[in-house]
Structures are given as C-alpha cells and as structure tokens.
Amino acid sequence: MARPLSALRVALLAELVDGPGTTQELWRRMGCEWPVLQVRIALRNMVSAGEACVPREVRVQGVRRPVPVYARAREGAGVRDGSGMADLIAVWAGLAPVPQWGAAM
C-alpha cells in the first residue's frame, strides 16, 4: 500500500485542478501557508511521482532561467497505486459528478 499524501501535496493537487501555474503562483493561490521552498520541493517530487507535469516553461522578469509551469498529469499517467486521489479532488472541485454507491465500476 502506498504512503498517504501529505497535506501540502493534497493542497497542491487541489490547486492544480483550478489550472496550471508556476511555483510562486501556486504558493500564492494556496494562501502562503507553507514556505515557498517546501512547495517547490513538493512540486518537483510530484513531477517525479507522475502526479504533476511540466508542459512548458515561461520567462519571468527578474529570473535568469525559464520558470517551469506545473499542471496536472494526464489521465492514466499520474496515479500508479490506484488510490484515485485525482478523481476525489475533481469531485471535490465540482469538475466531475459524484459517483453513486453500489454502481458498477
């Protein structure tokens, strides 16, 4: 069984449902609750785990290198353990219908 997700990763997945963003943008949308370095490390780990992806990089004034824009991983590419966390967040955000109990899966 996989390790449970931290509160930070759950919050980042919920923000990625709202749309892609850079580390700074996601950090601000989450209300600056965690240190920005911790958010950056969590995003990098989520990309390694297949929960998020970097579809493009953008130029930001005052930053020498291109800044990655993080987005949700494509369906089927992210959840390896079958936990369905992406489905849960989509239902919570109102982007997917609530499944009915007892329905065939």
Image (tube, grey):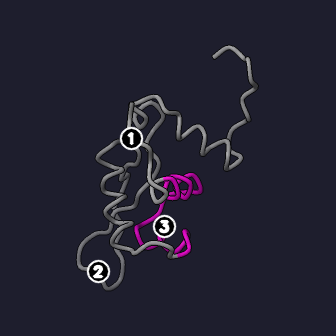
Residue 17: x %, y % from top left: 57, 51
Depth check, mark 2 against mark 3: the one in front is 3
Mark 2: few, some, or many residues within 10 Å (few <14, many ≥20)?
Answer: few
Residue 83 has which mark? none
Q: Nearer the viewer, residue 87 or 38?
A: 38
Residue that sits furthest to the top in the current view: 104
- Element type where label 2 sits in the image: loop
- Element type where label 1 sits in the image: loop
Between discs 1 and 2, the one toward the N terminus: 1
Disc 1 residue type (three-letter): Arg
Span of residues in magenta:
10-31
- Element type where label 3 sits in the image: helix
Between discs 2 and 3, the one toward the N terminus: 3
> Which residue, given by chain and number where applicable, does mark 3 sit on?
26
> Which residue, given by chain and number where applicable, does mark 2 sit on?
63
Residue 85: x %, y % from top left: 53, 40
Give the position of the N terminus as an image quadrant: top left
Q: CA distance from mark 3 to mark 1?
A: 24 Å
Residue 66, above or below 11 = below
Residue at 40% x, 48% y: name it.
Answer: 52
> Which residue, given by chain and number where applicable, does mark 1 sit on?
3
Q: CA distance from mark 1 to mark 2?
A: 35 Å
Q: Nearer the viewer, residue 89 or 24?
A: 89
Mark 3: few, some, or many residues within 10 Å (few <14, many ≥20)?
Answer: many
**The image quarter in which residue 9 lies:** bottom left
Q: CA distance from mark 2 to mark 3?
A: 17 Å
Task: Reply yes or no: does residue 17 show up in magenta.
Answer: yes
Residue at 29% x, 80% y: name it.
Answer: 63
Q: What type of secondary structure mainly makes up the magenta span?
A: helix
Between discs 3 and 1, the one toward the N terminus: 1
